[in-house]
Image: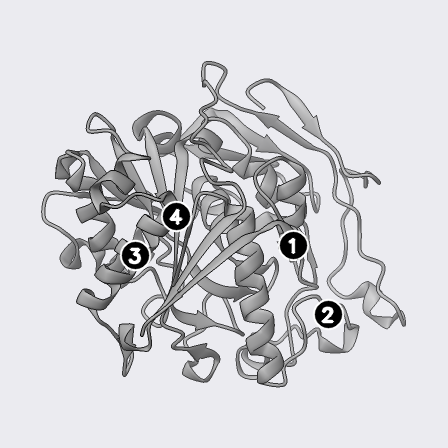
């Protein structure tokens, strides 16, 4: 993927395809459009790393849960500290926390911690968890000045107040200040596809990922997504690293499958993302990624830890599907035209409605690109519960 290549769907749609919002909804069965070809241009000098996705432990997912980790919507720092320590040791098989972190991080690294502030303040990467990750990185000798907390939009980071809540000395970076700002991106590293006849068909990789950090720890939140089905490791990493991604879904259709996985496969992003720690303190089971409706946010009190983003997202998808079933909400796989609404307010307050025909198949598609294991039967799902 470090050379100019093409990723094609089995049935390639026209690159000039333009679909009016709800033309197909009158049909009894929806015929979803096939994705166009996606041209990938990675960083030519990037060298693949054995630490890159799916990482040192393909298929292994460690789930740690403790009801005391979040009480009355407040995350307990001491409890998540213990949970993360247990998860890191179980993942790596190391007896000490420092040795576990040393599997992934060297003292000379510049470490990027990819947070997910989207959905703040109701649900975003918990500062308490990010602080523990910073401590783990520092335990192997990385100074605070070489730790970078980053995401795409500066304003979302501001809403989450990360600058005030995290360890002094670490850098907090928003890749872009406005929606059209491209100054923080490398114009030579991109994915190019024409989904709906948009004028700008390229999405560029953030310069901080391409040239700044040497390792990435991915900290997604556990939530559904109106277009991709779920927001997990893959979407947080791919769509948080590249710009101009909203063009991949125009109601009611979505090409998040296969774009999310394709973006994660681009070097050097693929090799630099060495560890994924999913924040499941709060689980958004409907209205994601931006909902502020507390009725749809379950205080699950869990973490998922692993190096395989596909396996982790597969487990996350299973957990969200289970919660939706418990609440009487339809599956994220449902493609019933009657469930589609153009009314955002209706979507945010009715769990039977959606804005798009969701594409949770992006997870399995990423597995076919070699990013991890999507078959539940092959996933080593380890569960640690508080006693």
Q: Name the residue under label 1.
A: 377
Viewer-closest of 50 and 344? 50
User: Which percent across, then down, holds residue 205?
Assistant: 46, 33
User: N-terminal of the two: label 1 or label 4?
Assistant: 4
Q: Which numbered marker is on residue 91?
A: 4
Distance Cα–Cα, label 4 vs label 3: 9 Å
Q: Name the residue under label 2.
A: 334
Q: Is residue 212 above or below residue 253?
A: above
Visual colour scheme: one colour
Apparent side of residue 62 relative to residue 252 in the rendered image (left or right): left
**Element type where label 1 sits in the image:** helix
**Element type where label 2 sits in the image:** loop
Viewer-closest of 316 and 17? 316
Q: Do the residues labelled 2 and 4 touch (CB within 8 Å)?
A: no
User: Which percent across, then down, holds residue 122?
Assistant: 35, 72
- Which corner quadrant of the image does residue 41 belong to? top right
Viewer-closest of 198 and 339? 339
User: N-terminal of the two: label 3 or label 2?
Assistant: 3
Distance Cα–Cα, label 3 vs label 2: 37 Å
User: N-terminal of the two: label 2 or label 4?
Assistant: 4
Apparent side of residue 212 relative to residue 166 in the rendered image (left or right): right
Distance Cα–Cα, label 2 vs label 4: 34 Å
User: Which percent across, then down, holds residue 267?
Assistant: 49, 26
* Viewer-side label of 2, 4: 4
Distance Cα–Cα, label 1 vs label 3: 24 Å
């Amino acid at each position: 993927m470090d050379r100019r290549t093409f990723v094609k769907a089995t049935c390639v749609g026209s690159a000039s395809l333009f679909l009016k919002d709800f033309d197909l909804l009158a049909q009894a069965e929806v015929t979803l459009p096939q994705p166009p070809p996606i041209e990938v241009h990675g960083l030519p000098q990037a060298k693949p790393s054995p630490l890159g996705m799916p990482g040192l432990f393909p298929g292994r997912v460690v789930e740690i849960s403790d009801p005391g980790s979040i009480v009355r919507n407040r995350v307990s720092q001491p409890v998540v500290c213990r949970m993360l320590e247990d998860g890191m040791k179980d993942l790596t098989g190391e007896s000490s926390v420092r040795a576990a972190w040393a599997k992934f991080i060297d003292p000379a690294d510049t470490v990027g911690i990819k947070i997910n502030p989207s959905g703040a303040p109701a649900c975003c990467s918990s500062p308490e968890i990010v602080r523990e990750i910073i401590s783990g990185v520092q335990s192997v000798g990385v100074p605070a000045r070489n730790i970078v907390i980053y995401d795409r939009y500066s304003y979302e980071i501001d809403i989450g107040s990360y600058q005030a809540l995290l360890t002094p000395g670490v850098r907090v970076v928003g890749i872009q200040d406005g929606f059209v700002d491209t100054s923080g991106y490398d114009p030579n590293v991109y994915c190019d596809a024409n989904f709906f006849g948009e004028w700008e068909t390229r999405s560029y990789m953030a310069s901080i990922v391409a040239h700044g950090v040497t390792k990435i720890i991915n900290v997604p939140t556990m939530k559904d997504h109106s277009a991709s089905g779920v927001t997990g490791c893959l979407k947080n990493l791919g769509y948080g690293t590249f710009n101009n991604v909203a063009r991949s879904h125009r109601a009611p259709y979505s090409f998040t499958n296969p774009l999310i996985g394709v973006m994660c496969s681009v070097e050097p992003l693929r090799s630099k993302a060495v560890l994924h720690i999913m924040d499941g303190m709060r689980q958004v089971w409907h209205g994601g990624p931006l909902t502020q409706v507390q009725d749809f946010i379950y205080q699950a009190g869990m973490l998922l830890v692993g190096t395989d983003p596909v396996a982790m997202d597969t487990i996350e998808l299973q957990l969200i599907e289970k919660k939706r079933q418990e609440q009487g909400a339809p599956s994220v796989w449902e493609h019933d035209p009657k469930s589609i609404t153009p009314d955002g307010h209706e979507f945010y307050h009715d769990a039977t409605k959606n804005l798009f025909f969701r594409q949770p198949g992006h997870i399995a598609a990423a597995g076919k690109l070699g990013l991890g294991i999507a078959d539940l039967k092959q996933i080593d799902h380890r569960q640690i519960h508080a006693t």
